[in-house]
Image (spheres, grey):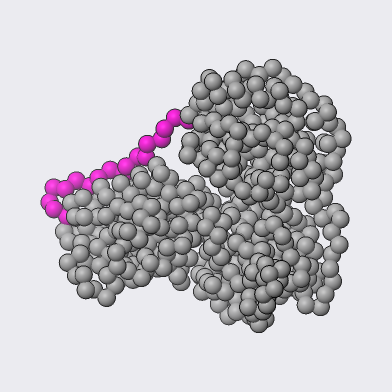
Amino acid sequence: MRAGEAIADAIVAHGVDTIFGLLGDANMFLVADLVQRHGVRFVAARNENAAVMMADGWARATGRCGVVTVTQGPGLAVAGAALTIARQAGTPLVLIAGDTPPGDPLHVQSFPQQPFALATAGAFVPVTAPATAARDVGLAFRAAAERPGPVVLDVPIDLQDEPVPAGAAPAPAVVAYRPASPAPTDAAVAELVGLLAAARRPVLLAGRGAEAAADDVRRLADWCGAVLATTVLAAGLFAGHPYHLGVAGGLARPLTRRVLAEADLVVTLGAGLNRWTADHGALFPGARVVAVDVDARALGARWPVDLGIVGDAAVTARAVTARLDPRERPEWRSPALAAQIAAADPFDGIAFVEGAAGIDPRAFMRICARRLPAHRTTVVGVGQFGGWPNLLLDSSAVDRAFIAPWEFGSIGVGLPYAVGAGVGRPDRPVVAFEGDGSLLTGLGELDTLARVGAPVLLVVIDDGGYGAEVRKFGPRGVDPALARFPARDLAAVARSLGVPAWTVTDQAGAEAAFDEVLPVTGPGVLHVRVLPEVTQERF
């Protein structure tokens, strides 16, 4: 058996059935072996950075470890931004990177892969010998699960053809260590109980890390008379609760802002509390802040807190409920507030703008709110355009149905993450929102979408430039033409690459396009030309 075959066997032993990537000299035969001998599905991207994003999107949608492969040198170098996004998001992911022969430092594609991997992914596992190849694969998968985060598994091209020594037993799949959910200390529980007992207007703010604790957090809120809210990444966690304010943060809706402004205590559970969650201090300025997180390093790291508690959200909520006397707080959780929450409409009070150049993006979102399937995966890319779906649409994040790869602030993420999510969860359609500038950084992945055939509707919000930069240039006296670009027929480009596409310039056209594209059973693109003068201040 060759070392390359042993590596393929070890990969499959870890439950891998789908791998993303781009072929090159240093990984092509490994991929061929995975496909032909093991039946692994290979999703070929057009760019290595996009391939890693697809694997990341697949992992976020499925909850499994994503796997991607690139070739040596430039293949790995191109993937740096995507690896950084995955590291900052804590996505379990193994990138199998080919490498040049260690004995050939003058190879044209020779590149210091280890320091590059450590600077981007943050973890590097080299395959050093045929006898240890299977073990090294296991170490990479274990590291990806335990960190969690991306790991670069480095496989020299010449080693793959070397024979595995006789008698070398294949290494079993390595099981990641799963520590028990941490419990808060008695002192921390007592202090939080005291704060909740003394508060007049408490709020429980849950993040993605509290999804499994939803029932316990809801029970604590009812027990102590608190209102509920979530981060964007936990949207929908308390849907249907009469005192659920919805998303808190920079994209909070007017009613949520008004109520949170009155809060005197905010307890975050499993939430990455940062400047966006607090809207730079404007959202709950008079409140004391308590953060509950399993990671001590996260407490107060990005936003100051009055009390940090290391503990699992569910365990902590149950412990506090058990020691706290019940409170009703009818002046805070009033029938009037419940009625306002039930009647709230995110489009109330918006004065829609009419213009020949396109549709008001808010008017388009109102149509999306009515026409898009509720059971969907929503992907929102990075840019000013992302503020509209995040603010105006109810996109549930439960069951991994909301993907927002904003960790590194990199544009061009919407389409590849949507492809990965569509491949990983074909049981529900993907609706992805992307900007024109972002899409143009990776048009080739429209071809990937067409070949894969995943149920992905890509909505391109086209304001003719980099909207965030245009908005910021004006007040500083800089000509915004630097960030504007000529109009392009993106729908025609999509069709030329095999994806059905429609252009939308007004409300009637939007309705007609949805009539044709719905239900989403395969790839599609809506190229929506919007009025550039309608801007989103918070995104």
Q: Is residue 157 left or right of 119 when viewed as pictured?
A: left
Q: Quadrant of residue 536?
A: bottom right
Position of residue 272 measured from the top left corner of the image (x, y, whole percent): 57, 43
Q: Nearer the viewer, residue 109 or 454?
A: 109
Q: Quadrant of residue 520?
A: bottom right
Magenta stretch contains residue 174: yes
Count of numbered circles on the image: 0
Counting from the top left corner in percent of width and height, residue 46 is at 46, 71
User: Which residue is pictured at 58% across the width and 31% down the height?
Assistant: 307
Please say if 146 is above or below 46: above
Q: Which residues are magenta?
A: 164-181
Query: Relative to 10, does residue 205 appear above or below in the rendering?
Result: above
Position of the C terminus by quadrant: bottom right
The residue at 76%/27% (across/down) is: 200
In the image, residue 308 lies at what x, y percent? 55, 32
Look at the image and tell me whether residue 342 can be seen: yes
What main secondary structure does the magenta stretch of the protein show?
Answer: loop
In the image, 155 versus 313, the foreground residue is 313
In the visual, does 171 lie left or right of 528?
left
Question: Which residue is at a point 28% across and 43% down the rendered structure image?
Answer: 172
Question: Is 324 situated left or right of 79 in this image?
Answer: right
Residue 388, picture quadrant: bottom right
Quarter of the picture containing the N terminus is bottom left
**Residue 336 magenta:** no
Seen at 66% across and 49% down, the residue is 280
